[in-house]
Image (cartoon, grey):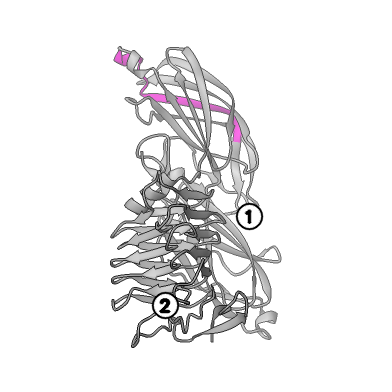
Amino acid sequence: MKKILFLMLLSLMTGLISCQKEETSTIQSDVYSLTVTIPQGIQTRAAADYGNGDMINRCILEIYRNDALYGERQIQAVTGNQVTFSNLKLVPSQTYEFVLWADCGDGLNDLYYNTSNLSKVTANNYKGNDDGFDAFFGTKTIEVTDAISENITLTRPFGQLSVKTNDIASITHADLKPTDVKVEFSEIPTSFNVRTGEVGDLQPVSYTTTVEDADAGELTIDYIWATSDKADLADFTMTFLNNGNTIADKNFSIIPIQRNYRTKVSGNLITQTGNINVTINPEFQTTPETLLEAATNGGSVTLQNDVIFDATQPAFTVAAGKTLILNLNGYSIKSTVANNDAIHVKGGTLIINGEGSVDASEGYYAIWATGDAHVTINGGNYVGNGSCIQANNNAHIEINDGYFKVQQPYNGVYFVVNLQDNLPNTITIKGGTFENCDPSNTNTEPAGVSDNFVAEGYSSIKISDQPEPFGTYQVVKE
């Protein structure tokens, strides 16, 4: 089965129209950028080869100020796992609401959804078993002070409902096996407010479609608008058809549907024997296995819980030639095995976004980059044991934000950021806070090798004498 947790790589977009005339005549606007992440490639959908997010090809941005649209809507083509809206003209000391929708369009035009009003997005001729109805949304309110470069991770507005019959193998006559199904929902939401995250317009919905996988008994997979804080209950009837002829039908009552949760309905549905089983699983549960698979195969992960790598799990390694985009999302990755690293980037590419922690206080390195690894750290808290951030071989690490420390010194030096000696590796620091370490003078490198990792145009300033003995330093733009 394919996986999902949905992402896309950078494109650039034209700027928004600046603020109202009376404001721009007295206040200078500045240039800002917004990077949108669409997580993909990790979660297992119910049917094979379904729901990997690769049909998402456009992203819509609307910006609101004082509850009114600010400038014009922007639509950007998606070509990877991210899309960047750059050169946004925003007036400082103002608060803006960023509203985002990503789906499968006809180029940049509507196809599966009517998005003319993001406060009431509706599906165009909805039916199940069509991955084009996959979509993502997100909102963020930002008070603009200095120039910003924000990252927003989108999520799905749906609950997923899959129906499987377990008795296909026991049906020996081909004309009694379903080729199609008719699904009739008594009422489900038929619109979605991207700005508020609320569903609306409960109405009956019905469709007829070819079964997803007849041999496996996979019948339907639906994306259904759902609320985030509780399970909505759905009633529906499924009629089994063989080339237009009715075989049987089945009624389903009070089936729970919840946003970002997966509801799987299974049983002997055609022969009408046995029980119907309903299981509800968090759609975005993060396990060591899902992280390892994304790191091995490439993809993106948004943590939905803390993940611990212990002696029962392999080391968390980003494979050579693969790219993992990791959103910590307020959670932690921790290694509890002595001398094991929390994350080893073994020739691959790792991009870390969001707040959360990478903890190797019981292991060794928080991040160890080797081979031709490329690592970008945009936030989070990092703690190492022997060293925190370590580059080896031809690895390149860029730190833009985050908090970094180690548990104890070695020969009187805290190896918070460190290069393996005499190798063509680099660490470039453009932001972040470093405990017991001055990134412009780390004292970690041998004679003749610069121990200033701060990028040109940036400075390291001491912000506290605590903890002892060296204090805490922060890297800021000059």
Q: How many numbered marks appear?
A: 2
Q: What residue does disc 1 label?
A: 195
Around disc 2, counting alpha carbons within 10 Å, would you say few (fewer than 14), some (14 to 19), or many (20 or more)? some
x, y percent for residue 94: 68, 73
Front residue of 339/268: it is 339
Q: What residue does disc 2 label?
A: 428
Secondary structure state at the residue bearing disc 2: strand
User: What residue is at 66 percent from the left and 85 percent from the top?
Assistant: 25
x, y percent for residue 134: 46, 45
x, y percent for residue 84: 46, 67
Q: CA distance from mark 1 to mark 2?
A: 38 Å
373 vs 197, left or right, is: left
Tell whether position 183 is magenta. yes
Give the residues drawn in magenta, as a range: 173-188
Residue 176 can be seen, yes or no: yes
> Which sits earlier in the primary sequence, circle 1 or circle 2?
1
Front residue of 99/472: it is 472
Quadrant showing the N terminus: top left
x, y percent for residue 302: 49, 53
